[in-house]
Amino acid sequence: MIEIDGITKAYDGTVVVDEVTLTVPAHSICAVVGTSGSGKTTLMRMINRLVEPSAGQIRIDGEDVSSVPAYQLRRRIGYVIQGHGLFPHRTVAQNIATVPKLLGWDRRRTAARVDELLTLFQLNPAEYRDRLPHRLSGGQQQRVGVARALAAEPNILLMDEPFGALDPVIRAKAQEDLLAIHKRFGTTIVLVTHDMEEAIHLGDIIAVMDKGRLLQAATPAEIIARPATPFVEELIGSGDRPFRLLGLARVADHLEPGTADGQPVEATASLRDAYSELLWSGRTAAPVRRDGEIVGKISLEQLARLAARPQ
């Protein structure tokens, strides 16, 4: 658990983070969202003491981070920076092994961890471990950057706009990779983004910041249904709110009996994805498939009713 209590940071009289209090439960993803200059990156960098607070306290599992030498603290916290930040003259394996080497891991353990993470990110170790970063695509560099941050098995992972430079298709894949990694390792993740869509998709908790202040911290459903301020409502987009809510629910939870014609929708898809599929295909209903078998259907009538349902 990360507990941020009254944290403030001032530079030359300018307050960039102003008395922020926030709790991030263990094993959750907290998406910190806001416009440029809102203080979100400064707040995140105070967790691993890359920025020292002017006032307040940050605790990790009850331990005040200021009581731990900064270099030791950072070795326990994974950090993915904007643009991946891979060392250009080190191989993929050497990049991933950076923190394990600092911690004194032996070669066999380090090599096994490198190969485990490359396999996890669908990068064949035999093919990729000896490549230099310039021989990787943007999406592959991003995966190696996350693998490096996870190499020493940290309990906490900090991510600063990790997907901002990726094209939409690769970005969507990178987001799904992150959710799969989170499900496997249960790492507590604090992710900074300016993209509310990304925050809603990834976050168990969304923390909205503006001008250094925390305006609201809540689940995606709560943020969408009950924005605390006009600024939060503007970030969500009032006209998009019903469709954003559809994006939080799965087709499997709203099956209708019977079947329908045409291409099936997967039970794991979101209601929003199902709605888009029906609109694009011009159908009023679609069969729903789970593990290769048709288990029911989903209809436009049902989706419209769910979108209009009071929250």
Image: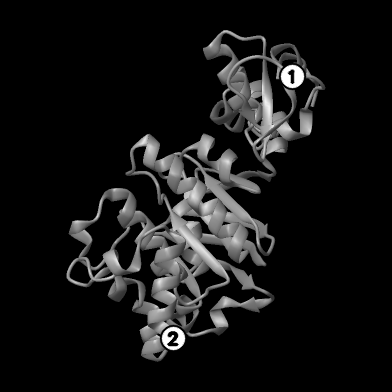
Q: Nearer the viewer, residue 298 or 11?
A: 298
Q: Nearer the viewer, residue 47 or 133?
A: 133
Alpha carbon distance from label 1 to label 2: 52 Å
What x and y, as percent, mark residue 229? 65, 32
What x and y, as percent, mark residue 185? 59, 66
Q: Is residue 182 left or right of residue 94?
A: right
Mark 2 element type: helix
| Residue 98 vertical position relative to residue 184 in the rendered view, above or below | below
Tell me, yes or no, if residue 54 can be seen here.
no
The total number of labels drawn is 2
Q: Which residue is mark 1?
A: 259
Q: What residue is drawn where x is 60% and y is 69%? A: 58
Q: Which residue is mark 2?
A: 109
What x and y, as percent, mark residue 224? 67, 31
Q: What residue is drawn where x is 47% and y is 38%? A: 195
Q: Amino acid at mark 1?
A: Thr
Labelled disc at residue 303: none
| Residue 188 vertical position relative to residue 272 in the rendered view, above or below | below
Q: Residue furthest front?
A: 293
| Residue 293 vertical position relative to residue 152 in the rendered view, above or below | above
Question: Which is more foreground, mark 1 or mark 2?
Answer: 1
Marked residue nearer the N-terminal end (1 or 2): 2
Mark 1 element type: loop
The quadrant in which the C terminus is found is top right
Tell me, yes or no, if residue 142 can be seen here.
yes
Q: Amino acid at mark 2?
A: Arg
Q: What residue is drawn where x is 65% and y is 49%? A: 204
Q: What residue is drawn where x is 59% and y is 39%? A: 200
